[in-house]
Image: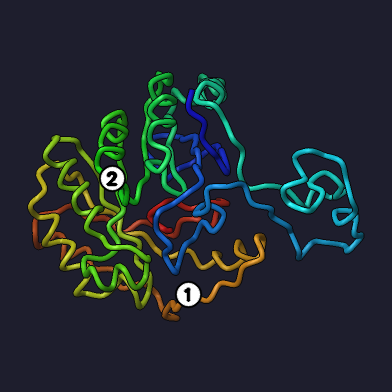
Amino acid sequence: MKRGTIFDIKELGLYDGDGIRLTVFLKGCPLSCVWCQNPEGPKMPPEVFRHQSRCKGCGRCKLPCHHPDCAPFGICLHACPDHLVGLYGKVYTADELAEEINGYGDFLAYGGVTFSGGEPALQSEFLCEVARQIPFPKAMETCAAVPTEDFLPLALLMDDLFVDLKMMDEGEHIRYTGRSNRQILENIRALDAAKKPFVIRLPLIPGITDSDENQAAIADFLSEMSSLQRVELLSYNPFTPTKYALIGRAYDAPIANRPPNIRTDLFAERGIPAVALRLRGADAPHSSPSNH
């Protein structure tokens, strides 16, 4: 049985599919976006978090302990009296995760479950096993930067798909995400060829992805897609830097200090439905892969 690593399960999601969603965040991502808004997501192994701003400096977490789960991290995960130290990341078998999701029962009947991340398709075989055991509506938020043989079987198991498309210029994509966009474009074409409906999400990062040129180029590419349902233009989450402090990382993304440039008209001119979504993440602890 396959195993996978999850870093959060969040109830009452409102932006991750129809109705009220249970959102499952999987660890691991093939991209390294400079603006990543889920810094606890990209690395596959579990990571320690510490709420430094609330720490009273008692030092208990630094004392030697004999808990087997603490040994790999050099810190006691159980000693903090205020529960300010813990792990991002828990390993599940496919059966265990499916059982936990299905345990929400009637709640899921009002919406469904959405797999987010990180990048869910990076754990494709594991998630396929999970998805086949869930009778409720299923959705996936994905950057699609994985091999098609891993991506497409998982995507076809989903009722709803939200696919990132951040930048069309390959050089700029490599500069800001660490990888080419060729695999992403190939997977979008594969969805269209399979006649699988999908939604494209474009994170509007001021000064990086929100230029007229980038949005127009994306619109040109998508104008050929018959299975595209709509484009969602997502606002940048300004609360991101506070999340980096929890895992001891600095946040220095070169984000322009201005509102995003929203050009739904560039998509409408090409016959593509496009909507600008409200700020996501200000009212929730995690944002979607669209905001990696």
Give how far apart the Cα atoms at labels 2 and 1 are: 28 Å
At which x and y percent is residue 26? 49, 42
Q: Is residue 222 left or right of residue 127?
A: left
Question: Residue at coordinates 9% horizontally, 55% vertically from top-left?
Answer: 223
Disc 1 is placed on an element classified as loop
Which residue is under mark 2?
147
Q: Could you say which quadrant of the image residue 16 lies in?
A: top left
Q: In this orientation, which residue lies closer to the viewer: 10 or 144? A: 144
Question: Residue at coordinates 8% horizontally, 59% vertically from top-left?
Answer: 270
Q: Is residue 174 above or below residue 106?
A: below
Quick check: marks 2 and 1 in contact, CB under 8 Å? Answer: no
Q: In this orientation, which residue lies closer to the viewer: 42 or 201? A: 42
Question: Residue at coordinates 44% horizontally, 60% vertically from top-left?
Answer: 279
Numbered circle sitting on residue 274: none
Q: According to the image, what is the colour scheme of the structure?
A: rainbow
Q: Nearer the viewer, mark 2 or mark 1?
A: 2
Question: Residue at coordinates 32% horizontally, 47% vertically from top-left?
Answer: 146
Mark 1: which amino acid? Ala
At which x and y percent is residue 58? 92, 60
Disc 2 is placed on an element classified as loop
Q: Could you say which quadrant of the image residue 109 lies in?
A: top left
Mark 2: which amino acid? Pro
Crowd rating for badge 1 (residues with CA inside 10 Å; few <14, some 14–19, many 20+):
few
Q: Earlier in the sequence, mark 2 or mark 1?
A: 2
Which residue is under mark 1?
253
